């Protein structure tokens, strides 16, 4: 069953995430929208802040993503930037009283550079850099971290270049690397050498075998190899995974590299393995939850269904229940 999911179901779901016709059909369905709230808790800053309050009450940290990607209009990129500034204003109200533990910021925002103009035909990289810099400046003022998300492999060089430029002025900036890309171990070595904050995930896009590992065992092996590189360096690794094998191996790797629980953190997605998130936080680990919000939830939602058979099974059961 797992092989069928990996080789047939997952590619179909990832292809569907890029299908505009299907997107419009799904977005109009009230049944689908109600189920989506398992993974995307709302569309407004107010919705996001309600989740922030609940997660912080349980001892978890937060990274908030305003959903959207691949904008092709400069005004849309500017609108995304304004949305992040509004979000940071709201988060700034919490940072005045939120406790900072060992220099780790409890609150963070995550950015997709393609939502900030990276994909524009004219000066896309410069537009994205300028917009990201505006967001980082505001984040620094209010005491919130920023992490630059990874997207498909064609954007990796541009994303790492922009992140490097931003890190000159904002050394706390985080960068996301995807372990299924064949290049990632070398990227980990470069970022670990400069002490960067790195979120390591498996990867959520459909990539060709020429640039990415496709077999689950190879991807897990690459992840653990990359994690050892990050743990051995002077930076701050962020273990973004729900995989029991990776979660079980992480404490041993940390011990080998003489890291305490305050020298790295775990990250998981909102709505996935909530009990495990609570357990990690309760037992003294730094646990951050990635919380997406906004109206552009379709692509994100489909990638979540493609990640784990359990996510797809939950969706199918919910639809069946609501259809009775």
Image: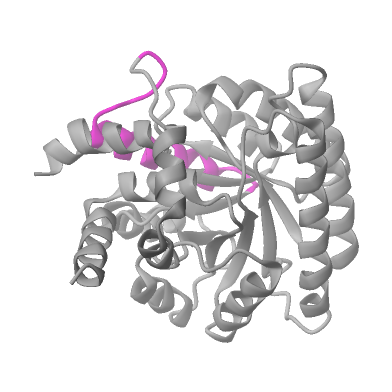
Mark yes or no: residue 193 visible: no
In the picture as drawn, the residue positioned furthest to the top comes out as 210
Find residue 202 and report its horizontal and vertical position in percent. Answer: 40, 41
Residues 224 and 302: in front is: 302
Seen in the image, is 93 located left or right of residue 38? Answer: right
* On-image quarter of the N terminus: top left
Question: Is 236 placed above or below 73 here?
Answer: below
Which span is picked out in magenta? Answer: 210-235
Mark yes or no: residue 139 visible: yes
Find residue 129 and report its horizontal and vertical position in percent. Answer: 82, 33
Question: Is 210 placed above or below 25 here?
Answer: above
**Residue at 83% across, 46% down:** 170
Question: Is 264 placed above or below 126 here?
Answer: below
Residues 294 and 27: in front is: 27
**Residue at 69% across, 74% down:** 46
Q: Which is the main secondary structure of the residues drawn in magenta? A: helix
**Residue at 45% across, 37% down:** 226
* On-image quarter of the C terminus: bottom left
Total marks placed: 0
Dividing the picture into quadrants, the one containing residue 192 is top right
Dividing the picture into quadrants, the one containing residue 103 is bottom right
Residues 234 and 278: in front is: 278
Residue 9 part of the magenta segment: no
Find residue 122 and report its horizontal and vertical position in percent. Answer: 80, 17
In the picture as drawn, the residue positioned furthest to the left comes out as 1
Seen in the image, is 230 located left or right of residue 6? Answer: right
**Residue at 33% across, 25% down:** 213
Residue 216 part of the magenta segment: yes
Question: Is 145 placed above or below 80 here?
Answer: below
Find residue 312 and report its horizontal and vertical position in percent. Answer: 25, 54
């Amino acid at each position: 069953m797992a092989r069928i999911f990996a080789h047939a179901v997952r590619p179909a779901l990832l292809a569907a995430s890029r299908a505009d016709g299907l997107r419009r059909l799904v977005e109009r369905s009230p049944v689908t929208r109600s189920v989506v709230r398992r993974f995307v808790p709302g569309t407004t800053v107010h919705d996001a802040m309600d989740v922030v309050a609940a997660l912080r009450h349980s001892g978890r940290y937060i990274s908030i993503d305003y959903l959207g990607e691949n904008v092709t209009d400069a005004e849309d990129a500017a609108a995304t930037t304004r949305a992040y500034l509004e979000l940071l204003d709201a988060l700034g109200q919490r940072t005045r009283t939120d406790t900072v533990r060992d220099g780790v910021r409890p609150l963070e925002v995550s950015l997709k550079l393609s939502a900030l103009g990276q994909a524009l035909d004219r000066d896309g990289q410069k537009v994205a850099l300028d917009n990201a810099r505006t967001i980082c400046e505001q984040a620094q003022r209010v005491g919130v971290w920023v992490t630059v998300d990874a997207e498909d492999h064609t954007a990796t060089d541009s994303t790492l270049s922009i992140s490097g430029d931003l890190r000159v002025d904002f050394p706390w900036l985080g960068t996301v690397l995807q372990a299924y890309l064949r290049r990632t171990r070398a990227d980990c070595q470069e970022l670990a050498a400069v002490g960067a904050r790195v979120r390591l995930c498996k990867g959520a896009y459909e990539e060709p075998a020429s640039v990415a590992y496709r077999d689950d065992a190879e991807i897990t092996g690459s992840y653990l190899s990359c994690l050892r590189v990050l743990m051995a360096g002077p930076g701050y690794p962020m273990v973004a995974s729900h995989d029991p094998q990776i979660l079980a191996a992480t404490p041993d790797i940390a011990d080998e590299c003489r890291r305490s629980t305050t020298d790295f953190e775990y990250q998981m997605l909102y709505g996935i393995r909530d009990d495990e998130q609570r357990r990690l936080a309760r037992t003294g680990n730094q646990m951050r939850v990635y919380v997406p919000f906004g109206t552009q939830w379709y692509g994100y939602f489909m990638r979540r269904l493609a990640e784990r058979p359990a996510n797809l099974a939950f969706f199918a059961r919910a639809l069946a229940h609501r259809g009775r």
